[in-house]
């Protein structure tokens, strides 16, 4: 196995992220990293360990994920706030200090990387696991599969990792690999078990012949949208996203266009896309500005609607906030011209440089283009 060679299509490609920060304990992180490297080398050519990411800023992580590893293995510090369903992981800030990053931001990145099919969360503190419960939230936010290693001891961690990745590299499903690792832990006397949350626990990251599986492609279905239980399944997915606070798109609009924007929001829901609209999500009796700022800081994308009335004063303030928050996260801001927008709409300078979605046109389908901008999934050509 090579720690520096590019990934091989016949091996399980793993990217280790072990953020170094000058205000965080580093000895435990380094020990975990060296232990993982040593154990993964025992798996031979079945595993390719990509060069580890230590200077793990959010931007650097995004760039490294473009290499297309099968697995992102994160070792480090984190925190979960169960009451508010909010979790963070510590990455490296520009000044070298630790920076708490919302795990929903990580989910938004991973959900656009089809090759990376598994996230493994490991604490660098042997007897403490700060990520407990984060996996369910991340999968609800669009991550394909997450495994929590739990509060394993220094003796148990290498055993679990070797058993897990060895089984995956041998072509077993995620569920089978997890069961294999947990059996090995149980035989060793460990009290902790690994947990898996996955959209498809029976997925194989590698085929039985050791070659890379193609990223799953949603096949067209001949069943009508009103097939039995289809709507119920869609509602359950939206409820799970809302419960986890994982909204797909912020709908920024002039109050004069509220009715039209609500119709578009309902159409997005029918596609399984969860929009954040103030009227639907701001509960009475709570400070709405803090809730609004929280969503702008974590949501995956934003759609800025412009109709006959142009940009409203409050909408302009929202756009300014979106611009500040989204530039660092490289999240999309999508200008959307409503059906009654003027021939030459007046847009903020930075929006004018972006590709529009135009509801004044029937072809190409504006709703399909808006969905593409939000999810990154190209619509089928008609």
Image: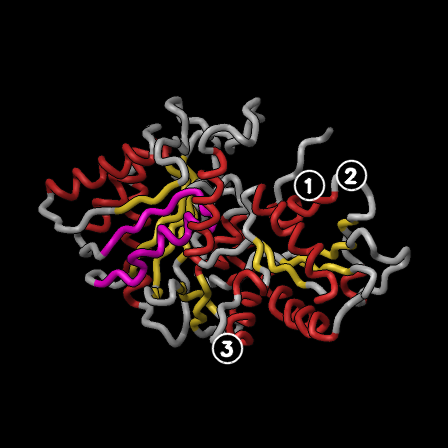
**Is-magenta flag for residue 331?**
no
Q: Are marks 2 and 1 in contact (CB under 8 Å)?
A: yes
Q: Is residue 44 visible?
A: no
Magenta part of the chain: 128-150
Q: Position of residue 222 (x, y in %)?
A: 57, 22
Name the residue: 26% across, 60% down.
129
Name the secondary structure under disc 3: loop
Earlier sequence position, callout 1 versus callout 3? 3
Q: Which residue is mark 1?
A: 368
Q: Position of residue 73 (x, y in %)?
A: 38, 50
The residues tagged by marks 2 and 1 sit, at their Cα atoms, a distance apart of: 8 Å
How would you rate the neighbour count of disc 2 (Cα within 10 Å): few for under 14, some for 14-19, many for 20 or more?
few
**221, 356: nearer the viewer:** 221
Name the residue: 51% across, 71% down.
291
- Residue 287 circle label: 3
The residues tagged by marks 1 and 3 sit, at their Cα atoms, a distance apart of: 35 Å
Q: Is residue 53 above or below residue 199?
A: below
Quarter containing the C terminus: top right
The residues tagged by marks 3 and 2 sit, at their Cα atoms, a distance apart of: 40 Å
Q: Is residue 204 above or below residue 28?
A: above
How would you rate the neighbour count of disc 1 (Cα within 10 Å): few for under 14, some for 14-19, many for 20 or more?
some
Name the secondary structure under disc 1: helix
Name the residue: 80% across, 40% down.
362
Name the residue: 16% across, 43% down.
185
Q: Position of residue 240 (x, y in %)?
A: 42, 50
**Number of marks in the image?**
3
**96, 115: nearer the viewer:** 115
Q: Which residue is mark 2?
A: 364
**290, 37: nearer the viewer:** 290
Q: Quadrant of residue 255?
A: bottom right
Q: Quadrant of residue 319?
A: bottom right
């Amino acid at each position: 196995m090579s720690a520096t060679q590019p990934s091989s299509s016949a091996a399980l490609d793993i990217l280790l992220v072990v953020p170094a920060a000058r205000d965080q304990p580093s000895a435990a992180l380094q020990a975990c990293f060296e232990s993982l490297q040593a154990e993964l080398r025992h798996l031979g050519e079945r595993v390719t360990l990509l060069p580890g990411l230590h200077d793990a800023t959010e931007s650097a992580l995004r760039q490294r994920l473009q290499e297309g590893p099968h697995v992102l293995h994160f070792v480090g510090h984190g925190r979960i706030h169960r009451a508010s369903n909010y979790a963070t992981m510590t990455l490296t800030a520009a000044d070298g200090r630790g920076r708490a990053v919302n795990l929903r931001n990580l989910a938004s990145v991973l959900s656009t990387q089809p090759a990376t099919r598994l996230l493994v969360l490991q604490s660098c503190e042997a007897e403490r696991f700060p990520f407990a419960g984060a996996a369910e939230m991340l999968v609800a936010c669009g991550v394909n599969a997450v495994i929590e290693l739990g509060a394993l001891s220094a003796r148990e961690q290498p055993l679990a990792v070797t058993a897990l990745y060895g089984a995956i590299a041998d072509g077993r499903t995620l569920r089978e690999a997890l069961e294999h690792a947990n059996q090995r832990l149980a035989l060793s006397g460990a009290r902790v078990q690994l947990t898996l949350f996955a959209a498809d626990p029976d997925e194989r990251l590698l085929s039985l012949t050791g070659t890379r599986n193609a990223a799953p492609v949603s096949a067209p279905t001949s069943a009508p949208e009103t097939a039995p239980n289809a709507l119920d399944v869609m509602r359950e997915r939206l409820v799970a996203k809302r419960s986890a606070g994982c909204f797909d798109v912020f709908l920024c609009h002039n109050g004069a266009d509220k009715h039209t924007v609500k119709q578009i929001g309902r159409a997005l829901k029918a596609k399984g896309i969860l929009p954040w609209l103030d009227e639907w999500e701001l509960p009475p009796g709570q400070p709405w500005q803090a809730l609004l700022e929280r969503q702008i800081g974590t949501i995956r994308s934003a759609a800025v609607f412009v109709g006959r009335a142009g940009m409203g004063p409050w909408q302009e303030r929202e756009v300014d906030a979106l611009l500040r928050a989204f530039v660092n996260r490289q999240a999309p801001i999508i200008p959307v011209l409503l059906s009654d927008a003027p021939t030459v709409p007046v847009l903020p300078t930075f929006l004018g440089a972006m590709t529009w979605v135009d509801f004044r046109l029937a072809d190409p389908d504006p709703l399909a283009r808006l969905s593409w901008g939000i999810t990154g999934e190209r619509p089928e050509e008609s």
